[in-house]
Image (tube, rainbow, N blue to C red):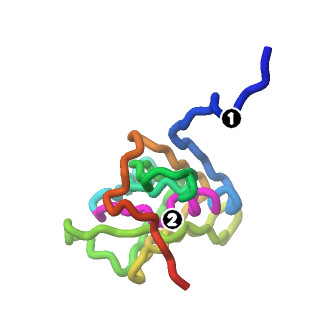
């Protein structure tokens, strides 16, 4: 038997879960600068599930990897959702493309609380949840970012 080598590793799609605010901060970092058409959001009231199909920038590879920046389609799913509200989003405009900046959780009456998806351009989505239960799962192979650039947030 030999030790594992770094070269033996392989890229694998992300499949992460979050059950508390610390876990959610990891998902927030990995979904920062994800883009998606407004029509790719769905709330299934009967299943208490809110889902978004994102085109996620692959932050986990890091810009120092030496290859062109990549994106991947990912499903961001929130369970136990009992209410959804939005601000600054025109859902009727099918051309609207949203950019996700962060995902945060604020507890109201443990374990219930609010998840806020903050969007570029002063938009936001607020989910009322019975408990924090989130998954992020890559559903396609990575592809070269059309801009060929890493997102930048100048101070």
Which callout, 1 or 2, points at the residue further toward the start of the chain? 1
Q: Is residue 94 left or right of residue 42?
A: left
Q: Is residue 14 above or below residue 145?
A: above
Whether residue 134 appears in this view of the structure is: no
Residue 8 pos. (x, y %) = 64, 28
Residue 120 pos. (x, y %) = 42, 77
Instruction: Please name the residue shown 63% across and 58% down the image.
Output: 26
Residue 124 pos. (x, y %) = 44, 75
According to the picture, the residue beneath numbered tag 1 turns out to be: 6
Q: Residues within 10 Å of mark 1 (few under 14, many from 20)?
A: few
Q: Is residue 40 left or right of residue 24?
A: left
Q: Is residue 35 left or right of residue 16?
A: left
Per the rendered image, the range of residues in magenta is 25-38
Residue 134 pos. (x, y %) = 56, 52
**In the picture, which quadrant includes the N terminus?**
top right
* Quarter assignment of residue 91: bottom left
Q: Residues within 10 Å of mark 2 (few under 14, many from 20)?
A: many
Q: Is residue 94 left or right of residue 149?
A: left
- The residue most toward the top is 1
Decide which of 14, 142 is in the foreground and name it.
Answer: 142
Q: Secondary structure at mark 2?
A: loop
Q: Secondary structure at mark 1?
A: helix
Cα–Cα gap, marks 1 and 2? 27 Å
Instruction: Please name the residue shown 43% across and 62% down the image.
Output: 34
Decide which of 38, 131 is in the foreground and name it.
Answer: 38
Instruction: Please name the residue shown 39% across and 81% down the image.
Output: 121
Whether residue 24 appears in this view of the structure is: yes
**In the picture, which quadrant includes the C terminus?**
bottom right
Q: Is residue 26 magenta?
A: yes
Q: Is residue 67 magenta?
A: no
Q: Nearer the viewer, mark 1 or mark 2?
A: 1
According to the picture, the residue beneath numbered tag 2 turns out to be: 32
């Amino acid at each position: 038997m030999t030790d594992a080598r770094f070269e033996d590793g392989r890229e694998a799609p992300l499949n992460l879960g979050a059950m508390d605010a610390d876990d959610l901060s990891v998902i927030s970092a990995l979904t920062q600068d994800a883009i998606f058409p407004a029509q790719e959001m769905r709330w299934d009231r009967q299943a208490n599930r809110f889902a978004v199909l994102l085109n996620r920038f692959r932050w986990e590879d890091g810009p120092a990897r030496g290859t062109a920046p990549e994106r991947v389609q990912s499903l961001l799913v929130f369970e136990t959702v009992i209410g959804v509200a939005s601000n600054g989003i025109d859902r009727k405009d099918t051309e609207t493309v949203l950019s996700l900046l962060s995902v945060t959780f604020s507890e109201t009456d443990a374990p219930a609380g609010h998840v806020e998806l903050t969007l570029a351009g002063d938009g936001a989505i607020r989910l009322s949840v019975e408990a924090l239960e989130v998954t992020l799962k890559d559903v396609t192979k990575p592809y070269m970012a059309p801009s060929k650039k890493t997102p930048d947030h100048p101070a």
